[in-house]
Amino acid sequence: MKQGITLRPYRREDAEVVTAMLMPVFRAGDTYAIDPDISEADALAYWTGPERRVFVAEEDGVALGTYYMVRNQKGGGSHVCNCGYITAPAAQGRGVARAMLAHSLEVAPGFGFTAMQYNFVIATNTRAIETWQRAGFDVVGRLPGAFRHPVEGEVDALVMYRRL
Amino acid sequence: MKQGITLRPYRREDAEVVTAMLMPVFRAGDTYAIDPDISEADALAYWTGPERRVFVAEEDGVALGTYYMVRNQKGGGSHVCNCGYITAPAAQGRGVARAMLAHSLEVAPGFGFTAMQYNFVIATNTRAIETWQRAGFDVVGRLPGAFRHPVEGEVDALVMYRRL
């Protein structure tokens, strides 16, 4: 465990640094189903949108990653949350994603969630899939050819789920 | 085939009649993951929201049902559409849902879609599930206990998918 990485709620002053984390990921278009030409303002508005709880991972006061948590459906589906995690390019390989995942699993029950779902995990994102499976997530669905990967072409997307 | 049922794009003048179709379904809270206490204005705004193509089924000038079509994901997932269908209470059992389903499958390729996905089909909604399976949809995912049914309690939700 990286004891130096801590999580705290997103603040307005984080807008610039968080936007800088989002853009390379959205521009690459190979892990998130977001229009690659999205504007910076729209990207931040998406990430920090209505109902979303947003957190920042930091170490020694430096922001290294961000994640959001939101109910995945409304009405009768409100007890299942969805999260998205993004690590700053310069902070890859330091356990930031694992720290964010652990934090999200820890705080979700306190917000009333009893399960967590990832709706659209690109099948080529094997590192994330393995991390989530180790954390107890099951692949509960496979969407054939649902993602057009910029390099690999049409690939499957997975639905992953874990009760909390 | 009910030859008398025709489909046409939603118009602003349909707001009242379409809202009257949506509300009983959303209030019941047993087939759509929508907050049951949603306001009429929010319900209509949801149904006819940004990017959504909305259609009305009618017979002899009387609106009998409505459905929307929207890309289910953005970016690399933009070629898969999602649809939702609602039949007016007084028009149940007359083939309105089947007519809307057939229309959606027919027009989707023209909008650039190559697959259709239903994200959250409540497992107790067996009539809809059977209709969609007959139309070529596969159950590609099962979300355990993802829906709290007002009568049945916690039930599964299904992900259904069909290439076009």
Image (spheres, coloured by chain):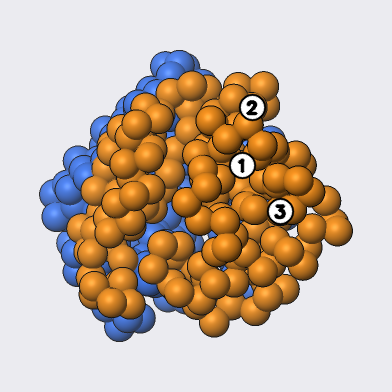
Chain colours: A orange, B blue
- Residue at label 1? A69
Crowd class of label 1 (few under 14; some 14 to 19; many from 20; radius 10 Å): many
Q: Secondary structure at mark 1?
A: strand
The disc labelled 3 sits on which kind of residue?
Ala
The disc labelled 2 sits on which kind of residue?
Val
Q: Nearer the viewer, residue A63 or B116?
A: A63
Q: Please, is residue A150 above or below residue B155 in the view? A: below
Disc with the residue nearer the chain's start (3 vs 1): 3
The disc labelled 1 sits on which kind of residue?
Met
Residue sitting at 31 percent across and 41 percent down? A130
Disc with the residue nearer the chain's start (1 vs 2): 1
Q: CA distance from mark 3 to mark 1?
A: 18 Å
User: Circle 3 marks a residue in which chain?
Assistant: A
Name the mark on residue A107.
Answer: 2
The answer to which quarter of the image holds residue B140 is top left
Name the mark on residue A63.
Answer: 3
Q: CA distance from mark 3 to mark 2?
A: 20 Å
Determine whether label 1 and label 2 are within 8 Å by CB. Answer: yes
Q: Please, is residue A73 above or below residue A151 in the view? A: above
- What x and y, as percent, mark residue A6? 69, 37
- What x and y, as percent, mark residue A148? 30, 72
Crowd class of label 3 (few under 14; some 14 to 19; many from 20; radius 10 Å): many
- What x and y, as percent, mark residue A144? 20, 58
The answer to which quarter of the image holds residue A137 is top left
Q: Nearer the viewer, residue B114 or A11?
A: A11
User: Circle 1 marks a residue in which chain?
Assistant: A
Mark 1 and mark 2 on one chain: yes
Determine whether label 3 and label 2 are within 8 Å by CB. Answer: no
Residue sitting at 45 percent across and 62 percent down? A32
Crowd class of label 2 (few under 14; some 14 to 19; many from 20; radius 10 Å): few
- What x and y, as percent, mark residue B53? 48, 72
Q: Is residue B138 left or right of residue A108?
A: left
